[in-house]
Image (spheres, rainbow, N blue to C red):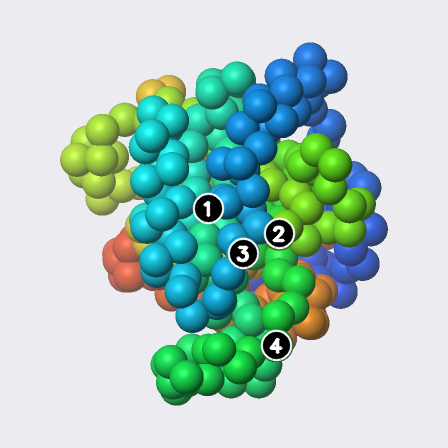
Amino acid sequence: MKKWLVFILLVAFKASFLQADDFFESIPILPADVVKKVNDWLISEEDLIKKLVLQEGDLADHQIKHTGNNEALREKGIINYSRSNYVFACPAEPDYMIKISGPTNRLVNTIVANEKWPTRISDEELYELKRVATYQTVSSLPTYYLYLRLQKLMPLKSVYIPKTYLFKLPQASDVINDTNYIILQERVSFLPKKESKELLKNLNNDQANELVAIVASCGLWDIKNNILIADDGRLVIVDLEQPNISNPLKGFNIQEIDRFNNNMNCGLNDLKEMLGKENCITTKPLN
């Protein structure tokens, strides 16, 4: 167990203290034909995208807003695979998933930015909150960047994070935040949940070691219910957003070592519970 903990600390330290330009300028770029098809679809569905992305209206009406947005998706025949966000296959490019953070997550971001706590704020206070730019959707990119960095340091054969792209909305400003950008992510075909749960109970050492490395290196915090199994047997992690209690006025979690380490510890505790004590993972520290 000691070797495992040393490995975690070394990787986490190397991953933190990054400038935003480091990860937003180092990620893969979508093929031009895909960009055009997605752009054309976004323009053709301007009213829908405006509802999903801008989320105009009172912050306090976040649940009403979310219900209305889900209804707007259903009217278009689009399945939302998320309970609190908007995650759906792009109709123009079904090999990619579109990801947009929902009103409740952005509200929590805003509450924290106003130096309050989500569980200790009254309904009346919600109407008094000062609006801020949030980064819940785009926070997936820094996490994916750290995954790409880890791939260069060690081979990852058992665990996979799908290709993840930042996509600027048509006519939007270049300022990177939730109202100007969405996430596109490679679509992966998964085994049924029941079959996946059974397989997750019997991970081998290689799979467990890679999970530890990715959680530690990427600061993944909510891992217990977010490990899926692809048709080809690989473990897949698709949820890359930072916690919604992150203060958007302080940038991204991977830019501050304390926040990064807190996320990492949450993810590792989930792994310990999932893998069980009999799966004591040992591995060598990265140079």
Dot 2 or dot 4, earlier in sequence: 4
Task: Identify the mark at residue 130; answer none if there is no mark.
Answer: 4
- Marks 3 and 1, Cα distance to the nearest angstrom? 25 Å
Dot 4 or dot 1, earlier in sequence: 4
Relative depth, front residue between 216 and 54: 54
Q: Can residue 197 be seen in this view?
A: yes
- Marks 2 and 3, Cα distance to the nearest angstrom? 13 Å
Amino acid at the residue labelled 2: Asp
Dot 2 or dot 3, earlier in sequence: 3
Viewer-nearest of discs 2 and 3: 3
Task: Identify the mark at residue 239; answer none if there is no mark.
Answer: 1
Viewer-nearest of discs 2 and 4: 4
Relative depth, front residue between 75 and 166: 75
Amino acid at the residue labelled 1: Asp
Task: Identify the residue shown where x is 81% and y is 41%.
Answer: 25
Residue bearing mark 3: 56
Task: Identify the mark at residue 178; answer none if there is no mark.
Answer: 2
Is disc 2 in contact with disc 3, using a CB cutoff of under 8 Å? no
Is disc 3 in contact with disc 4, using a CB cutoff of under 8 Å? no
Q: Callout 3: 10 Å neighbours few (<14), some, many (20+)?
A: few
Task: Identify the mark at residue 18; answer none if there is no mark.
Answer: none
Q: Callout 1: 10 Å neighbours few (<14), some, many (20+)?
A: some
Is disc 4 in contact with disc 1, using a CB cutoff of under 8 Å? no
- Marks 4 and 1, Cα distance to the nearest angstrom? 28 Å
Report helix, strand or loop for mark 3. Answer: loop
Q: Where is residue 55 in the image (x, y as percent from the top left)?
A: 52, 53
Task: Identify the residue shown where x is 62% and y is 27%.
Answer: 43
Number of numbered discs on residues = 4
Dot 1 or dot 2, earlier in sequence: 2
Viewer-nearest of discs 4 and 1: 4
